[in-house]
């Protein structure tokens, strides 16, 4: 487990803490205050399934069909913000262009396998929301590659994916999370057997369209781009 001292930079000054206390007393944090649930799941890099990590989602509803989540590497107060996820209904997902659908993953397996859960929430209450999540799709980008030991967010955002079948999740990672939160994925799997995924089934273009996707940044000369796109250029 990492410690806060591993982050480069000076320790927070007492004067900064006093300032934070003062601003917190007078400002409103409305977007943050809309967060209403904590979900724990596992993500892997879209281009490399061997790189898996625990992801803690703190989510808010924008409406009944759209949620937005801040993703941290733990639930502790000094957790690092490592990414974001947008969660949408099947109806909204089906309106997306096919090329866009590849960037979204289904939640059916995560939910039905028990590996997507709400820490500390009684099972009966948790399963009410899991029934809804089971039918949704999510799009995730991680900005901080903590799994490789980065002490700061380096490089470009990485597209992440979620589990879609048995045998994908690293057993040691699974056991570690189950032990920490006192849960049993197998037991929860049995209790979620009756849940159903998207009405039209998981779309074949979802989950990377069945292949890996890697986020890359390319440098391109503007002159070449303009010529290729037949964009008229005006010189003064």
Image (cartoon, rainbow, N blue to C red):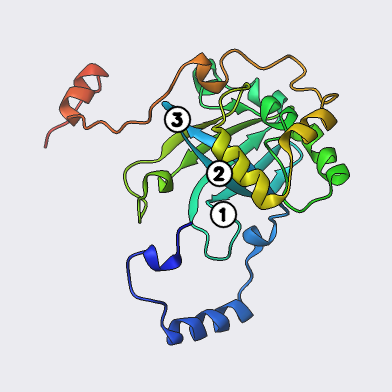
Q: Which residue is mark 3?
A: 50
**Nearer the N terminus, badge 3 or badge 1?**
3
Q: Which mark is residue 84?
A: none
Q: Is residue 212 above or below residue 146?
A: above
Residue 172, picture quadrant: top right
Relative image position of residue 233 (x, y in whole percent): 19, 28
The total of numbered circles placed on residues is: 3
- Res. 68 visible in picture: no
Relative image position of residue 34 (x, y in whole percent): 70, 57
Between the C-alphas of marks 2 and 1, the distance is 8 Å
Q: Which residue is mark 2?
A: 54
Which of label 3 and label 1 is nearer to you? 3
Helix, strand or loop at mark 1: loop
Q: Is residue 98 above or below residue 90?
A: above
**Nearer the N terminus, badge 2 or badge 1?**
2
Question: 113 and 172: which one is in front?
Answer: 172
Q: Residue at x 80, y 40 (%)?
A: 129
Relative image position of residue 70 (x, y in whole percent): 57, 50
Horizontally, residue 28 falls left or right of residue 192, namely left
Q: Is residue 231 above or below residue 234?
A: above
Q: Which residue is mark 1?
A: 74
Relative image position of residue 83 (x, y in whole percent): 50, 46
Density class for disc 1 (Cα within 10 Å; few <14, some 14-19, many ≥20) is some
């Amino acid at each position: 487990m990492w410690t806060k001292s591993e982050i480069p930079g000076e320790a927070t000054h007492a004067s900064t803490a006093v300032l934070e206390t003062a601003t917190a007393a007078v400002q409103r944090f409305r977007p943050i205050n809309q967060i209403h649930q904590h979900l724990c799941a596992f993500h892997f890099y879209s281009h490399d399934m061997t790189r898996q990590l625990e992801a803690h989602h703190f989510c808010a509803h924008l409406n009944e069909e759209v949620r937005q989540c801040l993703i941290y590497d733990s639930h502790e107060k000094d957790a690092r913000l490592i990414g974001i996820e947008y969660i949408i209904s099947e109806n909204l997902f089906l309106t997306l262009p096919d090329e866009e659908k590849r960037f979204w993953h289904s939640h059916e397996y995560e939910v039905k396998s028990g590996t997507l859960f709400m820490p500390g929430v009684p099972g009966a209450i948790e399963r009410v929301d899991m029934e809804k999540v089971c039918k949704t799709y999510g799009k995730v980008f991680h900005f901080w590659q903590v799994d490789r030991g980065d002490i700061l967010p380096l490089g470009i955002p990485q597209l992440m994916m979620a589990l879609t079948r048995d045998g994908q999740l690293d057993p040691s990672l699974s056991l570690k999370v189950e032990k920490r939160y006192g849960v049993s994925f197998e037991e929860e799997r049995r209790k979620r057997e009756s849940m159903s995924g998207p009405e039209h089934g998981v779309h074949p273009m979802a989950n990377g369209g069945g292949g890996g996707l890697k986020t890359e940044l390319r440098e391109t000369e503007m002159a070449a781009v303009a010529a290729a796109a037949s964009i008229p250029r005006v010189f003064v």
